[in-house]
Amino acid sequence: MNDFRADIQGLRALAVFLVFIFHISSSVLPGGFLGVDIFFVISGYLISGIILKKVEKKSFRFIDFYIGRLKRIVPVYYIVLTVILTAAVLIYLPSDILQLRMNAFWSAIFASNIYFSTLDTYFGASSIENPFLHTWTLSIEMQFYFLLPLLLYFINKKWLPIVLTIIIIGFLGYSVWGTYFLDLKSKMYFSLAARIPEFCIGALFAVKQDTIKKVGASALNYLSTISFVVILICACLFSEKSDYPGYLVIIPCLATSFLLINKSSFINRKIFSNRVAVHIGELSYSIYLWHWAVMALWRYYNVAYEFSGLEIILIIILTYLLSLLTYFTIESYFRRTNNKKFFTLLSVLVIILGMVATLLPKLNTYFYTIPDKYSRPTFGLKSHSNSFEKVESFGDLSKKSDSILLIGDSHALVYKNILHNLGLINSFNFRTITNDRYPNIPGINQKDFSNKDLFIQYSNIVTKTNDEIKKAKIIFICSVWFDDQSSLPNALNQFLKSLDASQTVVILPDYPTPDKNPIRMNRDFIKKDNSEYKYTVEYKKLPARIQKVLEQYKNVHIVSIDFKEKLKDIPFNKDTLMYYDKGHLNLYGTEVVSKEFDEEFMNSINKILQRH
């Protein structure tokens, strides 16, 4: 198992090729993500073979194994993390830099799979722009490498096939249960437990390969050809909508395993062992580390997710050159160093990475001096979402409480300062509590949430909201009313039905939004003279399904504002940026809206206030 096998390098090349194409464009190769599963199976197969051979010779030492894994994985990994953070100083905006540093931290300690499985990217850079997103696979590998030697060392080899089979079936059942029955697809995708079967399938084939080979060379050659075709078919037919990993993961894992045990097949000799495939396979680890980082930073800077033909060529060239550089200067070098020198150099890498991460925000703001007022939400956060501390009161607080409550999603968060300014001028006040994306209206079904943590957050906010609803005479609601929340109309209907006849609901109008993130396009809060981008502005109306519910209740009033009348240069006002992303007004923008539309808002609101 220690002998060099060119065909396994070629199989690695196939894996990284599938992942690379998938990340360039998932529409071209929708199931290319299974390249990761191929890597996991190869790791389980090779590492198990190496450990078992040393155990038989009584030469296996845990400390040697773990140091060997550190030498193989960590140095180039930390170099890439450091380079990404350094590049982000010039590429990332201050509003996203702290989240990027947090992503880097979890990646550096090999726990990014756990962190990313619960990450809500509703604000800031999306996951496709996260240059550390792909590190979840490295985290899972390192976690598994800690466990595998314990299993192979302490379990007698004759019992290993049974134990491995039980582990595969048990954890596969866990994955299937979580994916299909608990609707935890995202958590399963990033879960070590759900991925253990993939490593163990490779390990099982390493243990039983001599027995499997007894079927004969001819049968194995057919199996290798079929396995290669199956992998390609799966890469074309699987997609992000597939319930994965689940039971589907068995197919590419078994196919990969049959290719691993038959190095003499036509596929292994002629395809996987050719010079180009072997060369790419040798660089595969560096390619994997660099390719996504280059794509994500490119996407973030250009605020575009599809690549042109020229951009694809440039990304391929840049990824290849960076991979060549790190393979020959970092990967190959650190594998040959003695332990004392290795840990000395590793300590230096850790210190450099830590220093860059620490100085990151300060260096970033040196290049992008965009005040928080224009670049991030700043008002009413103590009564909002996961930053919730208390129910807040705004407006003219010198007046007696008007028993007004503002609820809703992040667009209601934006309205806090609009209503605050209107309240100061027109002598009213209000209390407020809001939530991200999912308005804090009771009754939204858990199935409408992208993950369980968001549902728990919503539930906690709703519990606090219910207490406020009982005390409110007037309830302002602002929401995007997302179509993917299928239970929202029914929840709204039940909420309105539960209110007392004396309580009034006011539906606030959603403000217009541009089609692109203007702060990312402009990279400043003052409009640049050379900015030629033309924004398409969406003037939103209440969805018909929501309008239908509201029309049933006489105590519901819908405020309508013609934003087109005075906002002529969205997303700017007098060349000053009004939005901190493409969906939310910044603090300056809310001041503009409250000033420009004071009369329109108050004509509607006063009629309602006068009744109470």
Image (cartoon, grey):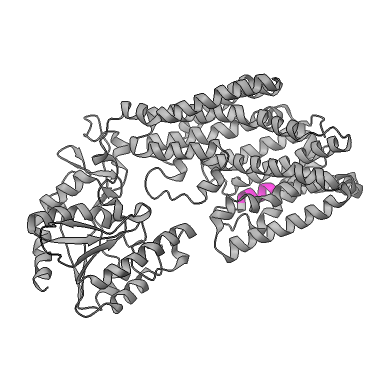
Q: Residue at x 30, y 46 (%)?
A: 582
User: Quick one: 287 or 104, which is closer to the camera?
Assistant: 104
Q: Which residues are magenta?
A: 230-236
Q: Position of residue 103 (x, y in %)?
A: 48, 40
Q: How many marks?
A: 0
Using residue 442 as the reference point, say whether residue 268 is left or right of it.
right
Q: Position of residue 484 (x, y in %)?
A: 41, 62
Can residue 529 be seen here? Answer: yes
- Residue 233 falls inside the magenta stretch: yes
Quarter in which the N terminus is drawn: top right
Q: Is residue 557 above or below residue 383?
A: below
Q: Residue at x 35, y 51 (%)?
A: 387
Q: Is residue 257 above or below residue 338?
A: below
Can residue 27 be seen here? Answer: no
View extreme (bottom): residue: 501
Q: Position of residue 500 (x, y in %)?
A: 24, 79
Q: Is residue 569 above or below residue 84?
A: below
**Picture quadrant of residue 271:** top right
Q: Residue at x 46, y 66 (%)?
A: 446
Q: Is residue 65 above or below residue 469?
A: above
Q: Residue at x 76, y 30 (%)?
A: 6
Q: Main secondary structure of the magenta part?
A: helix
Quarter in which the C terminus is drawn: bottom left
Q: Position of residue 401 (x, y in %)?
A: 15, 65
Using residue 513 as the reference point, say whether residue 402 is left or right of it.
left
- Residue 290 falls inside the magenta stretch: no
Using residue 419 as the reference point, say whether residue 486 is left or right of it.
right
